[in-house]
Image (cartoon, grey):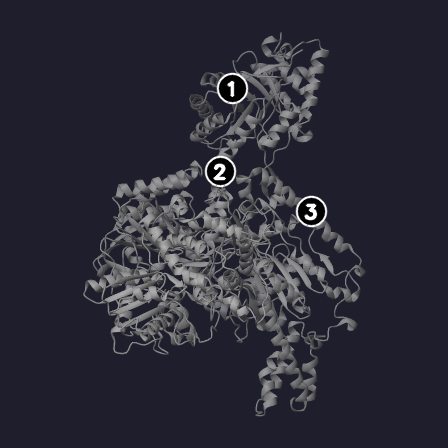
Amino acid sequence: MERMTLDGNAAVAHVAYRVNDVCAIFPITPASPMAELADEWSAEGRKNLWSAVPIVQEMQAEGGAAGAVHGSLQAGALTTTFTASQGLLLMMPNMFKIAGELTPTVFHVAARSVATQALSIFGDHSDVMAVRGTGFAVLGAASVQEAHDLALVAQAATLESRVPFLHFMDGFRTSHEVNTVTMLSDDDIRAMIDDELVRAHRQRALSPERPVTRGTAHNPDTFFQARETVNPFYLATPAIVQRAMDRFANLTGRHYRIFRYDGHPEAERAVVVMGSAAETLRATVAHLTAQGERVGVLQVLLYRPWAAGDFLDALPASVRKVAVLDRTKEPGAPAEPLCLDVAQTLADAFARGARKDLPLVVGGRYGLSSKDFTPAMAKAVFDHLESNDPRTGFTIGINDDVCGTSLPVETGFEIEPPGTTRALFFGLGADGTVGANKNSVKILAEDPERYAQGYFVYDSHKSGAETVSHLRFGNTPIAAPYLLSSADFIGVHKFEFLDKLNVLRHAREGATLLINAPYDPAELWDHLRRPVQQHILDKHLRLFVIDASGVAQRLGLGPRVNTILQTCFFAISGVLPREEGVRRIRAAIEKTYGDKGRAILEKNFAAVDSGLDHLHEVTVPSSVTSTEELHVFVPPDAPDQMRRIAALQFAGRGDEIPVSAIPVDGSYEGGTTQYEKRNIAFEVPVWNPDLCIQCGQCSIVCPHSVIRAKSYDGALLEGAPEGFLSAPVNARGYPDKNFTLQIAVEDCTGCGLCVDHCPAHDPLDASVKAINLSERQPQIEPGRRNLAFFDTLPEHARQDVDLHLSRGLQFVRPLFEFSGACAGCGETPYLKLLSQLFGDRLQIANATGCTSIYGGNLPALPWRSAPDGRGPAWNNSLFEDNAEFGYGMRLAVDQQVEMARSLVRTLADRIGTRLAEEILNAPQRTDSEIVAQRTRVEKLRRALADATDGLARNLLALSEYLVRRSLWIVGGDGWAYDIGAGGLDHVLAQPRDVNVLVLDTEVYSNTGGQASKATPVGAAAKFAAAGKRTPRKDLALQAIASGYVYVAQIALAGSPEQTIQALRDAEEYEGPSLILAYSQCIAHGLKLNLRDGMKQQRRAVASGYWPLFRYDPRMRQAGMNPFRLDSTRPRLPLEDFAYQELRYRILTQTRPEEARLLLRQAQAAVDERYRLYEDIAARDGTRFHPFWQEESVAPHNGNKTGEAAQ
Amino acid sequence: MTLGTTYLSLDLAHPVIAGASPLSATLDGIKRLEDAGAAAIVTASLYEEELVGEEEALEAIAVVGAESHPEVTSYLPPRCGCRNPLAAHVETIRRGAEAVAVPLVASLSATTREGWVGIAADLQAAGAAALEFNFHHVPTDPTETSADVEGRLIETVRDVRAAVHIPIAVKLSPYFTALPHLAASLAEAGANGIVLFNRLYEPDIDLETMTFQPNLELSQKREIRLRLRWIALLAGKTPLSLVASGGVEGVQEILKYLLAGADAVQTTSALLRHGPEHLARLVKGLTEWTQGHGATSVAEVRGRMSADRLEDSGVLVRAHQTTALLL
């Protein structure tokens, strides 16, 4: 039998692909890889059991995918989908239908938390539990092997029972764990699938040959009875599943039970559980029973339909106390769902005499959002059952210091089997560590007698993230679905981690430590901080050092230190004899790169050789010499919340945060990123004041807001640190003013966009700009000093700068800074602009996606307040509902504006009639007008400050609404073009003042580059691997067609001024506005790693691919044409823009002829679209809708805030 | 009346070959050139350095943001069915060789020994009728001698000769000091022909951006003179096939090259200017001129004015045009 090392997603997809005709999907973490694999195989022409290539169709949303699944099933195809979390919830209505119609299908789910107080992409059963009432059978796997096997059992069972199945594994813990799996052969799969049943399914399909009417509507007279008709099918299902499992066992030798019991045959205490925790419990139970404890664990594999009899048969009669562990939370319920099912079953059995006694049943929660569940926690649960008063509602794995639900966990309890080697690697997102470790797992599991497991933990940044790889190798199958608590080998692939993370707390006595550091063996020790030295000495670690980053740079591998460090691991870890390990790596390289070109192959071989050459063992001194402690992130004067939460998370100690420290409703103070100082750039920009023309272009394009400018009185330079750069202001009329461009060196990601975009260069050397990249290390200290001084210089008053130009905007402090977005991100500069233009009154509804992850993933919160305490208020609802979410905010704001205005009228006498009049009639368009209104509202508050009556207090509470609020609906193209398109369409059709900003990367960036309807023709993306065949949807033109939406298409580098103008116009316009912002993205595969990003924006505009325009309905008031084309005719062949990007170039390699054809089509489409825009721009004004807010047609329920503004 | 000629021991219907250009980069282009009447087609050059660049770019697909975030294992779709760039090029040659009846000469410009030998073998296996080495070298190292440069070229030919059996033509730049000696050495190393001459990039400075702009303009008629001289001087004195390349705009240039002793003539710029259909006009013109001058075959025309057949070849070896001025 073939063995493979693969993760749960691949293990499931292997089976699902072979037994289905159609997959209708929508990407969602952590289930996306299943769909992506299916799509990849389909593109390759791989066949299913029936020698057909399955159709894999991406839909616009999970709701759409479920509809397509339903339709496909009704039309007779074997159909599946892959999903998780909110995606599964969006499928619910169809799941009821599919089950109600007794339609066989299996939905494969990587179970994930449902968003509540926060979104989480990680695993628990809240999604599966939420759909338990749909009528789907629910079958849960505990390991990668189980997921692989049960995928097939589910398929066999659904065909026989006609009950649809939800087959799930734990998101991430199983879906992303790499483990050694014995693969099912096509013969095995074939043997499990009865073609008679498949034909029966096809026969039940709708067909004009056998016409039926299905999907009818019932009245009270029949619905109930009809609902009860399915009972026999559900009653039969558990036995069908068990038979399928038995048949499976005969074929493969792997036995499954719908309820699996392990432990003492006469156990007194038992734990009931679903999912991967069962593996941990089994190992713990084995350990405890060996010590004489009478304990057992019952794993529920088939949760629905619940087979009470089988459950009772599986649970030993001797059990007196049962703890049921639920990986979900149902607030307000007497217990979580599995616990209630178990309790009901036992109570019923006892009442009927089927059991002699009724055990005590308690329920507890564990593992929400992939919280680790360890053997120590498993033991704690058994210990709790042993206590005098076991209670329901306990939690395990956290410190609940509010309600005291959490159980104490014994530290140091470990049951790792002897003979298992454990290794931990601390890497950086882009350095290839994770990939190399997956490769190591594969290499080591090549031997039939060896097993390997890999699991990977990432922090929340899109790039430059810290990754921790947990690897186990051993001679028996590895059933340990929890993180390593101690390791025999620790690899630190970025030296800085040692300064801030306590990585060596995981080191075992005598473990091997490998550090990637730019230091000689002799000098390494002096660079290690005290706690690190102490660990090394106390635990007698063997210490090795290699300058892998230096070697990689010299070999032209950039940041990719993976092969070098992987070689070192094999050379010194002892998992294989050294020579054998190196031989295996070389063989793996040959396999991976053999067909990718000789140069690449040789570069990797060179990495192996250099790795061995530059690896040195360090002689460890006998004593600690450093006095330096680990880096502390958040200073003592930081807000309390940041010290209690963000500080610990930054230090990798988030698990220690108690419940009491966490806000009850998900509200956090933003701006934590200012404390991170990630120092991830290799090079950072350095300002050259002599060449600088002070235009602000560098600052406006900076994705991480690290370039700040101030102009100030020259006298303030007194006391400036040495080396603080300054230049006279170069504008006329400011003779004594100085200008400084300050770089936040430690927050910069080194993307280089600023340098590329800088228009000023040395007259004799175009490569020397007014801002240039230089190595970061020497810049850190002066950078820190200069930034501290810069921060003491006075901020500019908003009303004093020209907010129309980048030159002026550079002086406005961004309230969005240092996010975890990718280096060179094309989206973030627009968000920074929003924060500069409208930050003190900005309210954002943010669709799920990159923007919500780098915008709001703890602990890195980039949205912050200004020194006066005002700043952007931000919330993320879901992926699909963002337009509606923002619109709801608009309704609430409008309503409260009306209420406030009404109260001002009512209380005019007490406020002062003149002030009241001024407040009601104040124009609030310009910044100075806003400042004036704020002053009036302040006066109003003072006037009412002492009032005690309800009306006055109501007005005080509502007075903030008298200052115009800037409401923005922000999201990506996946939201705007696909999943949220319906809502967006509806919201844009309403006569209210909402501003929609679409950060258009033309692809689902956050989930890893899946095609959206914004993906252009000819570009390859996931689910369009053969190149997108249809042109991108012209969302702008759709909105323009309505006549009353302000529409703009912008590209920051194409024209910063047009961008700023469009954002200001949209904000000013008192109706719906839509802005499409071109955003380069890592998923485009730009040749120069996004450094070229702004140049590429200019190419997009110059080629006519992304014309700039504005459609302003207000122009109709003056009888003018509202459509203005702001960019020139195409003056660059599309090819010169497109082929800068790998997404287009892939096709030239894979399908050269088609690539040429698609390019021709794309060029024709670009030319024609520009002509169309030109036609529109050239029309007479009368050819457009009249202005919709004209007196005679003004809607009566329109936004009345306009009244104040006119 | 026959226009037939032999080039690199390949029998050609006439002496007009389509030179390496973007036109012959695709299967479609190769077919169009055959349809238009090319006697042989030299495929667009495969540049090893570009190949490596492409390989690295494709590898970058796998690496772009890979495993950088829990939601992202990669950003671009896997290289489904994606051959490496060399395989893609070789595949074009293979399909081209199958699709056309005229000989397909594969042009190669490698930078390493492994590249020359390995890729040459791949091209032979794909069905190339012959190889054309696009050998260009811009010496920048002051310690490198002319002998080093020539030695490397000869060594390369020797290495590839040992690995392939199909004919090899070497396309030379005009900057070799002692061309007849080099030609002899190449023949001795196993080359079967030389192409005179390669045209190299002559970058210009853009005063606006103050950067060098790589630039290769299409060839002009006047460029044939340098080539005429060397073909006339070499014809009959070397066992190598001689092909003229550069400046062939109309039939006159072809005739001049043939008269000087070229076995065949490549045309490239004219086809880029006027389209592959221009080939038919050239062949027609050649036929008409040959017939008009009473010849029954191209063989009768070829080499009539090579140095060894001229009574006075002084005009060819004179370095300055004093005589011309005096006359």
Locate residue A1172, reporting x and y percent.
Answer: 73, 51
Chain of the residue where label 3 is placed in the rendered structure: A
**Residue marked by disc 2:** B83
Q: What separation in Å lies between label 3 and label 2 (alpha carbons)?
A: 32 Å
Say whether residue A362 is left or right of residue A1186: left
> Is disc 1 in contact with disc 3, using a CB cutoff of under 8 Å?
no
Dot 2 crowding, Cα within 10 Å, few <14, some 14–19, many 20+: some
Amino acid type assigned to the residue bearing label 1 in the image = Ala
Image quadrant for the N terminus of chain B? top right
Residue A1133 in percent (x, y) is at 64, 43
- Please name which of the two marks, 1 or 3, marks the residue nearer to the observer: 3
Figure check: B305 above or below A86: above
Q: Position of residue B301 (x, y in %)?
A: 65, 11
Say which amino acid is labelled 3: Asp
Q: Nearer the viewer, residue A168 or A1196?
A: A168
Q: Position of residue A774 (x, y in %)?
A: 47, 53
Q: Chain of mark 1?
A: B
> Is residue A323 at least partly visible in the picture?
yes
Instruction: Say whether disc 1 or disc 2 marks the residue closer to the N-terminus.
Output: 2
Question: Based on the displayed image, in which of its 4 quarters is residue A161 positioned?
Answer: bottom left
> Can you identify the residue that label 1 sits on?
B178
For label 3, the residue is A1167
